[in-house]
Amino acid sequence: MPMRKPAILITGASGEVGQALIEHLAAAGDSRLLSMDLQPLPARLVGMSTHVQGDLLDTHLLARLVSEYEVDVIYHLAALLSTRSEVTPELAHEVNVEGTLGLLRLAAEQTQWRNRAIRFIFPSSIAVYGMPDRESKHLYARVREFEWNQPRTMYGCNKLYCEMLGCYYSRHYRQLAAQQPATIDFRCVRFPGLLSALTVPSGGTSDYGPEMIHAAARGEPYACFVRAEARIPFMAMPDAVSALLRLASVPRSSLSRQVYNVTAFSLSAAQIRARVLAAFPDAQIEFVPDVKREAIVDSWPADLDDTAARMDWGWAPAYDWDRAFDESLLPTVRARYQHPNS
């Protein structure tokens, strides 16, 4: 029987976080990369990983991958995002929960078979929080991991439940078995809104920030679906990738918990608009709140308390708002649309 090939598995690999992870891990050159997505990888990444274009819910496909590869680490990025999840909640549950459950079960079985924990890295979201009203959001400005876990969206419910599933599989799976089996090493980061430069926003409720920038660069008017004073925390995409890699690299003994907040800066929609207008003076950005989408944003904290991540594994963002805009967002978006002022 041929030896299986050791690999790191990245699901949702064609998204911006997945693409950046492939670039970083391929540059390190320590492991074979196995990527998976419904979409193909961009041309620049071809050859950096063995890419499988397929559905995460295809159990036969997963079984074939396990037969060929010995997966040591899983970065599970595949998900149906918040706005799309509200339109098709049943599909969201199928993709976000059933897909995650299948991977957790696969990781648990492989962990037991090898008697060595597979590391399972899971990006969660600010959507797991549910502030009841704007007054509470104002009073409880920085929220810790265990506070206000009452999500009001299907996406938030999916993410919170998957966090709990991950903790179950890493602590209690088959706990009534005669001999306690080895368990997976589940680690989770809860991201704030992510500011995307390389890819066009596609279905996130926090996407009004990057949508402003992309619309301005294209010379198109933009109607922001939240009011000017709406505020949530954000993070530049390079820091999101850094957080995943950093959390995956630290010894398990350094971690006091399995789910960690991470964040970088908190901004109002008006602050984002002002910065975009400074870079694109002709941009047409107005505030036309969508009551339902704005209510979702209002249910999310104005800021996240990421003290635990800073203490346990040295988390610290490299990008504040100025650097994120000037060095990451603005030049990348301008180059994408070949803006004449670039």
Image: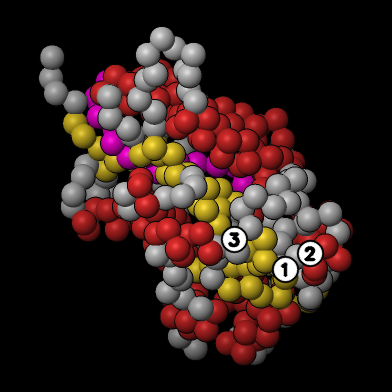
Residue 74 falls within the magenta-colored stretch: yes
- Residue at screen point 52% across, 53% down: 260
Indicate the quadrant where residue 84 lies.
top right
Q: Which mark is residue 141?
A: 1
Crowd around label 3: few <14 · some 14–19 · many ≥20 (10 Å): many
State yes or no: residue 117 in magenta: no
> Can residue 125 be seen from the camera position used here?
yes
Residue 312 in which image quadrant: bottom left
Q: Nearer the viewer, residue 312 or 235?
A: 312
Q: Residue at x 51, y 35 (%)?
A: 167
Which of the two marks, 2 or 3, is nearer to us in this view? 2
The residue segment tinted magenta is 65-84
Contact check, label 2 and label 1, Cβ < 8 Å: yes
Question: The residue under label 1 is which amino acid type?
Answer: Ala
Q: What residue is rendered at 65% in x and 32% in y? A: 93
**SS for dot 1:** loop
Q: CA distance from mark 3 to mark 1?
A: 14 Å
The residue tagged 3 is 192
For residue 128, above or below residue 162: below
Q: CA distance from mark 2 to mark 1?
A: 6 Å
Residue closest to the eye, 221 or 30:
30
Mark positioned earlier in the residue sequence (3 or 1)? 1
Assess disc 1: are there few (<14), some (14-19) or many (≥20) residues with their C-alpha within 10 Å of its C-alpha. some
Characterize the local packing of mark 2: few (<14), some (14-19) or many (20 or more) Cα atoms within 10 angstroms.
many
Give the mark toward the camera: 3 or 1. Answer: 1
Give the percent coordinates (x, y) of residue 174.
47, 17
Image quarter where the C terminus lies is: bottom left
State yes or no: discs 3 and 1 in contact (Cβ < 8 Å). no
Please name the residue that numbered disc 2 is placed on: 137
Which amino acid is tagged 3?
A: Pro
